[in-house]
Image: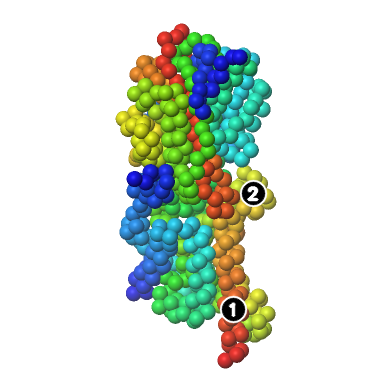
Amino acid sequence: MEYLLAFVVGGAICVIGQILLDVFKLTPAHVMSSFVVSGAILDGFGLYDKLIKFAGAGATVPITSFGHSLLHGAMEQAKEHGFIGIGIGIFELTSAGISAAILFAFIMALIFKPKG
Amino acid sequence: MVKMKEDYKNKIRDYQPKPPYFMNCFKAFLIGGLICLCGQGIQNFYMNVFHFSEKDAGNPTVATLILISALLTGFGVYDKIGQFAGAGSAVPVTGFANSMTSAAIEHRSEGLVLGVATNMFKLAGSVIVFGVVAAYIVGMIRYFYGLAF
Amino acid sequence: MKKLKLTGKQTWQFENPLFIHSSGTAVGPKEAEGPLGQYFDIKHKELHCGEDNWELAERRLMEQAVEQCLTKGNKTKDDIDLFLAGDLLNQNVTANYVARHLSLPFLCMFGACSTSMETVAIGAALIDGGFASQVIAATSSHNATAERQFRYPTEYGGQKPDTATFTVTGSGAVLINKEVSNIKITSATIGKVADLGIKDPFDMGSAMAPAAADTIAQHLKDLNRTPDDYDLFLTGDLSGVGSPIVKELLKEEGYDVHDKHNDCGLMVYRPDQQVFAGGSGCGCSAVVTYAHIFNELKAGNLKRVFVVATGALLSPTMIQQKESIPTIAHGVVFERADGGVSS
């Protein structure tokens, strides 16, 4: 069941992205940026956690969850350190993802040549 | 009669092929859903085999998906998936990894420092910048709202 | 006072008989597999063309096109007075670095995808004016160098719309002189920049069609001719979207070219080669014209062709600044001549 929900919710989020690309003619960078901001805003209202509980990977895999993690980490640290905590916590939860992306991109650039 | 030149942008609409809206959305739904499905599988794998809690399994799951996406980019496969799936491959975190890896691989010819390292965030930078700025703003609002009420 | 060779507003009529002495073409794998594959001189099996990076690959293509042009024409580098060349890359590096290798007097030209006819027109004019006697005009483009400069890294998974065009990996070079051959250059029309407000870099056909229509219409007006005087109006890279538009625009000016129009972007690839609306790039008009069209002229299947290369004069920065795309089209008339031996 959780697989079905992950498939459907994840797919639905991608469909919203496709509509932004085809109908509103935004570039992929614009779409991804607006999704990240939406993830942060939805988490601000406490809604994204609910979506994650409901859809599992269907909510954690799309780039919207990146916005959610940025805010989440910030809020966790804000609880402890006041509003300075916002800055301390922003990359706390997203560190694994960003570091992995940087490291693997670098390694791939060493191993592979572009194929066109 | 209005000449084509005088109302060009509107008059050429008939000549511009429209994107196959329904088909594109269907393909995006399919591939995006599949990628999330794999993510769910990977998450369960980490939870059952390595005994991560649901919360902790998120990080290795994302890292694994990023590795897979980087490899597919390196092998020259991801761009073909992207042409087929559109948002279905761009919206999941795999799209983020592809944007970084493709830029890094492409600029290898300019060296490691000025090529690979400098250009890596060419496409992904906007995501990080907007994410952080949004998190700061929403975070501030949430924080001060919490203090006031 | 000597008669002005400018006829009408934008057309040059050459006083001396000028000829295409020889031509050379070098292409990448996709073009080699296309419908005109058999006509190209050098065909690479792989996009890197045996080089380490994309820019070197494009340079190699231009060097090979020029080499072939010289060999087929039984000339050497030392016979050449002037080299005119251009490409799509910033600062025209392909042309510059090939010129370094050739070590010939060199004039660099930029007309985006209209460079082929721009270089031929200027080369012909310089010979006609007595400033040179043997001129090589060359241009090139490469799919990966264009993608990497104008759009996205080549391995990026972005989705292209059906209006997009596919930059041709290829280079073409011609040797122009007064030695009689089967292909005569009789006139050229220099285009003006047109811009009807198109801002989408993934639909350049729509942006360039007005420029092509302008140049063709002006050419016919200047020479007081009609479409019946020609066998073919060949545009450079309007491709699937721009081709019907240019025919319609010309019809509104009173010129019906429906059964006499073709486009290099539609000829260089088969529809099943996944090239969206068709081919584009400096190399597109060059390789199709210099390989295939010249063959047709030599064989007598075509007698008078007006080749109109179309260029989109944009840059990524201008697009990001929300500017529209200015475009230009330059045309040259090639005619079958009963001449001496040519290659």
Q: Is residue B41 above or below residue C188?
A: below
**Residue closer to the observer: C20 or B65:** C20
Nearer the N terminus, badge 2 or badge 1? 2
Distance between the alpha carbons at the discs numbered 2 and 1 = 35 Å
Task: Tell me what residue is drawn at x 52 percent, y 10 percent.
Answer: C179
Quarter of the view holding residue C57: top right
**Residue closer to the observer: B114 or C269:** C269
The residue to which callout 1 is attached is: B139
Which label is found at residue B44? none
Judge depth for marks 2 and 1 and give the one in front. Answer: 1
Report if residue C164 is visible in the image: no
Task: Tell me what residue is drawn at x 62 percent, y 30 percent.
Answer: C108
Q: Is residue C156 above or below residue A101?
A: above
Report if residue C292 is visible in the image: yes
User: How are the colours assigned in the image?
Assistant: rainbow
Q: Label 1 sits on what residue type? A: Gly
Q: Label 2 sits on what residue type? A: Gly
Say what secondary structure mark 2 lies in.
Answer: helix
Q: Is residue C95 above or below residue A77?
A: above
Query: The N terminus of chain A lies in which quarter of the figure?
Result: bottom left
The residue to which callout 2 is attached is: B115
C113 left or right of C265? Answer: right
* Chain under callout 2: B
* Chain under callout 1: B
